[in-house]
Image (tube, coloured by chain):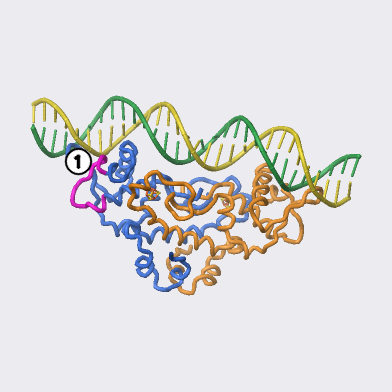
Chain colours: A orange, B blue, C yellow, D green
Amino acid sequence: MFKLNKMTDYAIVCICILSKKMDRFINAQEISHEAGISLATVQKIMKLIVSKSDFITALRGSSGGYKLTKKANEISIINIIEMMDGPVCITDCVDGNHERCSSSENCFLEGNWNNINMIIRNTLQSYSIADLMCSDPISYLYKNHSNEDEFNKMELS
Amino acid sequence: MFKLNKMTDYAIVCICILSKKMDRFINAQEISHEAGISLATVQKIMKLIVSKSDFITALRGSSGGYKLTKKANEISIINIIEMMDGPVCITDCVDGNHERCSSSENCFLEGNWNNINMIIRNTLQSYSIADLMCSDPISYLYKNHSNEDEFNKMELS
DNA sequence: TTTAAAGAGTACTAAAAAAGTACTATATAA
DNA sequence: TTATATAGTACTTTTTTAGTACTCTTTAAA
Ligand code: SF4
Ligand code: SF4
């Protein structure tokens, strides 16, 4: 499916929770409670995030936990997605992908996915977790798109 | 991973092959040969496509095969993707998704993915298999975007 | 009318990926 | 010193995806 992994989704939820309380360390239990995700899963995800990202500090011991070092509007959701899942590559034959497609020798579409992959990447790139938390489509579009092109295409409910 | 299923990818390759020879019926063996995909897999995919799409005709018997009823520029790649995989839903809590997220009762992000999901859907919607086959980024962008916004964001190689 | 060729339908198997669990080690503040 | 919290690792289960096999039906040509 063309869907975010559950773990990646959860990672974003966890980071959003941290971004709301940047003044202190939040521990896994607190995140688990607030997110409605099991403690074990939160622990697993947080460990991963810390080891792979550069915008989070962890502190052990009592009154320890996690704290962000960047603000919500400075963290693009593509950072989290690529951190958890590796590079966004819609197919195997896209630039930057490590795996190789077994049909690439015959396939006349080889490499042609790069354009659309780039467009999707740029979309994700321009979307911060602050945008995600605010959930207001109008503010995002006016901020990021000078024209009304994309705006009109959206079927606002 | 944020990647197209192999079967969906293959489906698009097969349809592209058909679109190059719209004057006659092409059988599974010929597609298999041209695509470099095993015959059994091509057969499976073609059966699926026929049963789910409205732009392909199948003919049994000798000199049978498959033929498109629409031109390449009239078939959006999102048609094929959603036909093979179901609706494009970046998370479970996006409108139009059938499954339910187990955290949706607690999660304060519930519903907030709709915007970005819509933008991705629109991107895929506006991309036809003719665009994919041509592989020329400039022609696509000038055709579909009146402004130079997205154009400038792309890192053209 | 017969026959070979090709798709339709269905069920099954194998492989890969994702999600969830458990346990030990290490660091920290009280 | 102790309780608490993260770090690291390995394992198991579940789910999804990919691949295979076989029978049935349709069709055009011999
Ligand atoms: S080379 Fe062809 S079959 Fe392989 S990933 Fe690219 S488009 Fe798909
Ligand atoms: S409700 Fe929250 S956890 Fe569930 S799919 Fe939506 S964002 Fe993800």
Kindly identify the residue that appears in the image at 31 percent across and 58 percent down. Answer: B130
Residue B111 lies left or right of residue B72; in this view the side is right
Is residue B150 positioned above or below A57 on the image? below
Amino acid type at image mark 1: Gly
Closest to the observer, A13 or D7: D7
Residue A144's spot in the image, x, y percent? 52, 70
Residue A32's spot in the image, x, y percent? 69, 47
Residue B153's spot in the image, x, y percent? 48, 68
Residue B136 lies left or right of residue B107; in this view the side is left
* Disc 1 secondary structure class: loop
- The part of the chain drawn in magenta is B18-30
Disc tally is 1
B19 drawn magenta: yes
Q: Circle 1 is placed at which residue position?
A: B64
Which chain is mark 1 on? B
Ligand 1 is within 8 Å of the C-beta of the residue at disc 1: no
How many C-alpha atoms fall within 10 Å of the one at disc 1: few (<14), some, or many (≥20)?
some
Residue C5 lies left or right of residue B89; in this view the side is left
Residue A46 lies left or right of residue A101; in this view the side is right
Kindly identify the residue that appears in the image at 37 percent across and 60 percent down. Answer: B127
Quadrant of the image containing the C terminus of chain B: bottom left
Kindly identify the residue that appears in the image at 45 percent across and 52 percent down. Answer: A90
Is residue B83 positioned above or below C13 on the image? below
Residue A60's spot in the image, x, y percent? 78, 49
Kindly identify the residue that appears in the image at 34 percent across and 58 percent down. Answer: B128
Closest to the observer, A108 or B96: A108
Q: Quadrant of residue C22?
A: top right
B58 drawn magenta: no
